[in-house]
Image (tube, helix red, strand yellow):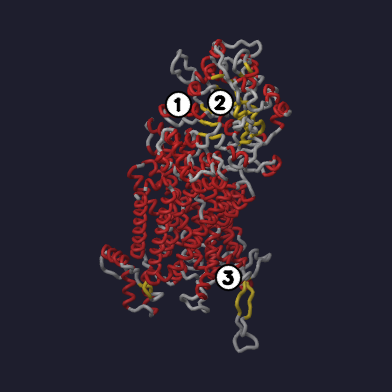
Amino acid sequence: MSLPGASAMTSPGSLAAPGAAPDRGVDPVLEIRGLCVDYGFGDDAAHAVADCDLTLGRGRVLGLAGESGSGKSTLAMAAIRLLRSPGVITGGEVLFHPRPASDGEPATTLDLLAAGEQELRAIRWSEIAIVLQSALNALNPVSTIGAQFDELLATHRPGLGRASRRDRAGDLLELVGMTPDRLRSYPHEMSGGMRQRAMIAMALALDPQVMILDEPTTALDVVTQREILEELMGLRDRLGFAALFITHDLSLLVEFADDIAVMYAGRLMERAPAASLFRSPRLPYTYGLLHCFPPMHGERHRMDGIPGSPPDLRDLPPGCAFHPRCQWAIPRCRQDVPKLEPLTGSHREVACWLHRDNATAPPELMRPDPAVAQPRTAAVSDTSAERAV
Amino acid sequence: MALNTTILSEPNPPAGAAAGTPRALRLPRSPKVIAGLVILVVFAVVAVIGAWIAPYSPNLTNESWVQHVLVAGTGPGTHIKADYYPLPLPPSGAHWLGTTVFAQDVWSQLLVSTQATVAVGLLAAAISTALSIIVGVTAGYLGGGADEGLSLVGNVFLAIPGLPLLIVLADYVPAAGTSIFLVSLIIAITAWAYSSRVLRAQTLSLRNRDFVEAARVSGEGRVRIIIVEILPNLIPIVAASFLFTTLYAIGAYVAISFLGLAGSPTSSPPGLWNWGYMLRETFANDAVRGGWWWWWAPPGLCIALLGTGLALLNFGIDEFVNPRLRVAGLSRKAARRLGISRRPKLGLTPVVRRNVINVTSAESRTP
Amino acid sequence: MRALLRRLGVYLLAAWVAITVSFLLPRAVPGNPVAGAIARAQSSGICNSFCVKAIEEQLGFNVHTSLWVQYVQYLGNLVHGNLGFSWSENAQVTSLIVSYLPWTLGLLGVATIMSFVVGTLIGVVMAWRRGSWLDWLMPAATFFQAIPYFFLALVLVLIFGETGSLLKWFPSLYGFDIYGVDPGMNLPYIASILGHAVLPALTVILASMGGFILSMRNQMVTTMDEDFVLVARAKGLRTGKVVWYAARNALLPCVSNFSVAISIVVAGQILVEIVFNYPGIGYHLYGALGALDYTLVQGIFVVITLVVLAANLLADVVYVLIDPRARQEA
C-alpha cells in the first residue's frame, strides 16, 4: 500500500505553526496528515484509510463524501481516536490547534495520535464534539436528556452548580428550537428529529471548536433533514465552530459545505471548493456520484450512476482503485496509483491520471471551473493547495 | 446447572438474513469450539460403544471386589459370630475406577451409564426443539390472536418451575422414569417454552424482511415460506437452543434419578443406569464421608465435563450469531510485540506505526 | 401499570395451571399409586380413619362425588390455606410448609441475591477488561455452570464440611446444631443457623454465579459496541461513568432473564437442601417422596410454584423500575 511521494507536498516544512498563515486566510484547527488506518492486524488486515491529508480551517465546513465503505467515517473517527476495535491507526499525525489564548499567545498544538488518555479526555467534547447518524443510539436510553446534559457539564465545568447546569442545558435546548421542559424526557419519548436536535444541543454544550457530523441527518426525513441542517449552519455562523460533515449525499454538501473532499476505497481522490466540485467535477468518480442524484435545479443530466460496486479493501485492484468502474480508464490507471495533486491554476486537487501529463480528459471532466473565473478567498484550506496557487 | 441465556435473549439477526441468503452455520474455529467438539465426540462415542467395551456388567457383584472388614466386637475372641462390613476398593489395574460398596466395578457403571444419560439429553432436546419451533415460529409468523394465545401458553410454561413439575409428574407415573422416551418427553414438556419465546421473537423480525415479503407477494404458501425462507435463517438459534436444552435435559434427568424417581436397575421394571443414579447410590451410602472419591467423583465430573462441552460449542454459535463477542484476531504474542493491548480500550484507538506499510510517509515525515 | 398487570395475569394463570395439574394428576393417573399409599398409611397406625378420609378427599380416592365437585372443593380448601393432611408427618400440610418455608426462602434469597450481584459485577469487569487475564474466568465459569448443584454440594462437603475428610471448617448437616442449642431468640441458636447456612449458601452461589457472570459479560460486550457508550467516551466522561453507561444498559436483559434463572436456582436448591439435610422445603420434598406421602408432595409443589411466580413478579417490578421504556408502556 506504499505510495511513493504521495505526501511530499506536506513535507515537514509545511508543518505550519498555528496562525502562521493568517495572511493567506487559512487558520487550521484540525490537520490530518498521512493518516493510515487498518482493520485487523497482519496479512489479512484491510487498509481502510491510506495516507490521507485533510485540513479543517477554523470556522469552516469541510464535507467528506463517498459511498458507504469508502472510509470516510473511519477517517474521521480514527482522527479523534474513537475508532472501534479492530481499527488500528498505522501512521500519520492529527494536529489539533486550540484557539489562541486571550493574550494572543498561540496555544500549543496537540497531536491526537500521540496524546495520552488524559490529554484526549481534556479536549473531548470541550473542543471536539461529534454527532452521529442515529441519536436514538447515541443517547443513553435509560437517562433523561437533562441527566445527560448534567453529567456532561458536571464533568467538564466542575465550577457550575446544579441549578446553573440546568439553566445552561435549558438554554442549549432553546438554541436548537426545543423547549427546556424536554430535559425531563427520555430519548424514546421524542421524535427522531427532536432527538437529533437534542444531540446537537449537547454537542454545543461546551462551545467546541470542531464538530464532527457523521451522517447527522441520514436517518431523518427530507424535510426535517433540511430544517436541522439549516439550523446547524445558522449556529455555525453565530458560534463559529468548524465542522467536518460526513455524508454520502453530495447534493447536501454542495449546499452546506465550503469545501468538499471525495473519498474512494480509503483514499482521498478529489478536493475542491464546493461550487467548483459541483459545477465542474474533475474526477470520474465524483462525476458519477453527482449523477446519482437528480439535480434540483440547473441543467438536466443523464442519470448514469456508477456501475459496479466498491472494491474489497482487502483485495484492491492494482493502479487506481476506481479503474474497474471508470468509463474513461486509460492503460496507466491499471498500473500506477494516482496521487492527490493540485491542478494547475486552481484551488483544487485531484488524484486521476486523466488530468496528468499528456492525457486528455473527456469533456465531461473539463467543464469550466467557476472558482477560477472568480477566485474565492480561502477556498480549500489545504497547505498543498495553497502553495499551488 | 445454570444456563447461558445471552445467546437466546439476544436474537441478533444473522447477517445473511438481510440479503435473503440463508447461510450455513459456520462455527468459528476457535480453541473453545474445538475443545467443545472433542468433548462431545468422545462422549458420543462412549455412549454408543460404552456398554460394549465395559469390562463387566454394571450389576455384577463379586465378593472379592470389596475388602471385608471385621466389625469390632464380633468374631474370634468374642461370643458373637464374626460379622464383616464391605469397604470398596480404590482404583487399581483390575478396576480402573475402583469398586463400589456393593462390590461392583465403577468404570463399567460409568461407561454403561453414559448411554442413557446422553440419550435422554439428546432425545429430550430434539422433542423440545421440535415443539419450540412449531409453537414459536407459528406464533411469530401468524401474529394476531394465534400469537397471543401461543405466547400465553409459552409464558405460563416458562413461569412454572420445571424441576418441581418434573418431580410431581415422575412421582405419579413411576414407570415413566424407566423409559428413555417417556422421561425425555416429560423433560421436553418442561423445557420447550424458553426456546419458543426466542424463536418467536426472531421469526417476528424476519417476517417483515424484504425477502419474506417478496415470497409472500409472489404467492407462495405459508408453510412453504416458513420452511424455505424463515427456517434456514433460524438455524443458529435452533442449534443454540438445542445445545442449551440438551444441557438442561441432562441436568433434569440426573436430578430426578438422584431423587430416585427414575427407578433403580434392580427394581421392576428396571431403571436405566445413568450418572444420576450412580450419584444417588454414592450419596445414599455416604461415599463422601467414607472418602471413596473414585466412586462419587467420576459421574459428577462427567456431567460437568459434558455440560462444559455443550456450553463451549454454544460459545461458538454465540460468536457466529453475534460477531461482537469475537475477540479481535490478534494473538497475545503479536499484541505484545506491537506493544498494544490485545483488546484495545474503547475510545482509545491504538496507534501502531509500522514501517512496512508506511515506509515512504515515515521517511518523508521525519524531519 | 398495564404491562405489569399483564404479567400478573400470566402468573395467575400459571398458578392456576399448576394447581389444576396437582389436582388432576392423582385422579387421572392409571394404576393409581395413591391407593397403595393410603393403605400403607392406614396399616402403619399413624393414620386413623379421620386422617385417611382427609387424604382420600385431598387425592380424590374412594370419593364418589363428581370430578367437578371435587375440584371446587379442592380450590375452596386451597383458598382457606388447607393443603390436606400429611400422614408421614402426622400434621397439616400447610403448617408443615409454613415451618419449612423460612429456611428455604432465607437461603434462596440471600444466596441468589449475592450470586446475582457478585456475578454481574464480575461479568462487567470481564467485559471491560476483555483480552486480559480475566478471560480465563470464562472457561471456569462455563465449567461451574455445568456442574449439577448437588454434586458441587458433595465436593464442598468433602473439602470444607465437618462430615468431609479435609478441612472440617463448617457444619455440613442440618439447619442448626440440633443437639447443642435450643431454638429461640438466643445468640447461640442464631450463630448456629448462620454457621450451618455457609456451605449450602456457598453451593448455591458458586453453582449459579457462572450463569450470571456469562450472561452479564456477553450482554456487556454487546452493549459496549453501542453508539451511546462510544459517545460517552467522546464526551470525555470518566472511565467509571462510561462503564456505568454500558453496565446499566446491559443489566436490563439480565434482569428480564432472571425468571428463567430463578426456576433453575430453585431446582438446584431443592437438591442442595437434600445433601445438607437442610430443613427447607426441598429436603422435606425428598422425605415425602420417599414416604410416598402424596399430599405433602402435592402441597410442596404448589407452594414452590407460588414462590417462583412471586420471584418472577418481583423481577418484573424491578425491571419496570430500571427501564424507563418499560415504565412508559407500563
Q: Is residue B139 above or below residue C175?
A: above
Tell us which disc is closer to us: 3 or 1: 1
Q: Which residue is mark 2?
A: A310
Chain letter of mark 1 equals A
Report the amino acid beneath label 1: Glu
Q: Considering the numbered disc 3 on the image, is that residue within a helix, a strand or a loop? A: loop
* Labelled disc at residue A68: none
Report the amino acid beneath label 3: Phe
Q: Which residue is mark 3?
A: C170
- Alpha carbons under labels 1 and 2: distance apart: 31 Å
Image location (x, y in percent) of residue B344: 62, 42
Q: Residues within 10 Å of mark 1 (few under 14, many from 20)?
A: some
* Labelled disc at residue A230: 1
Report the amino acid beneath label 2: Pro
Q: Is residue A155 among the parts visible in the rendering?
A: yes
Chain letter of mark 3 equals C
* Tag 2 and tag 3 share a subunit: no
